[in-house]
Amino acid sequence: MTKIIVDTNIIFSALLNTNSRIGQILISGKNHFDFYSPEYVRFEIFQHKEKIKFTGKLTEDEFIETLSLILRNITILNQSIIPQEIYRKAELLCQDIDIDDTVFVAVSDFIQGILWTGDMKLLNGLKNKGYNRFISTDVLYQDFLLRERKK
């Protein structure tokens, strides 16, 4: 199965609309993809929890329930398992794009997966540096639909 590393902005999108393409992939795609995120994703989600609840008009219970629904299909990895040389390489790639994305790039390289992000600044920055271990929502959704039809 394809290993997909899920960036925090993807989880934010799914939290705001579970019926979106992103929500469908994360909630129903576990038979087609293996989803991973670094432990840091939890920190980012809870750092922006109130904004997510406000924007999505979610109660505390709805937020927790929706988050649980999404996270149950994502393997959360402790980033301390990433060897220093892989982390340093990711840090060099991300230092002038967004240093907070280093851990997502490092996990992608470590488990030899594909980074799924909606962050165009990150995607374009990585692409300009010759890094191509990422996928857009549009491409992933088309792959998801094809796999669903074959079920």
Image: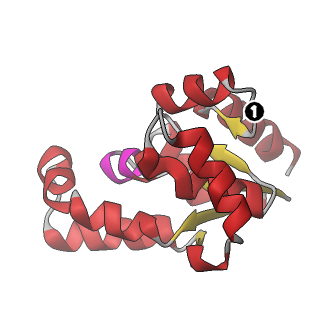
Q: Magenta: predominant secondary structure element?
A: helix
Is-magenta flag for residue 105? no
In this rendering, would 115 be left or right of 113? left
Horizontal and vertical percent for residue 72? 53, 74
Question: In the image, is residue 15 above or below residue 118?
Answer: below
Horizontal and vertical percent for residue 69? 45, 69
Residue in view at x 38 percent, y 70 percent: 42
- Closest to the observer: 53 or 110? 110
Q: Name the residue under label 1.
A: 132
Question: In the image, is residue 72 above or below residue 136?
Answer: below
Camera sees residue 77: no
Residue in view at x 88 percent, y 45 percent: 150
Is-magenta flag for residue 14? yes
Horizontal and vertical percent for residue 124? 57, 22
Classify residue 55 by image quadrant: top left
- Closest to the observer: 122 or 3? 122
Instruction: Give the magenta-colored segment's residue range.
Output: 12-16
Residue in view at x 65 percent, y 20 percent: 128
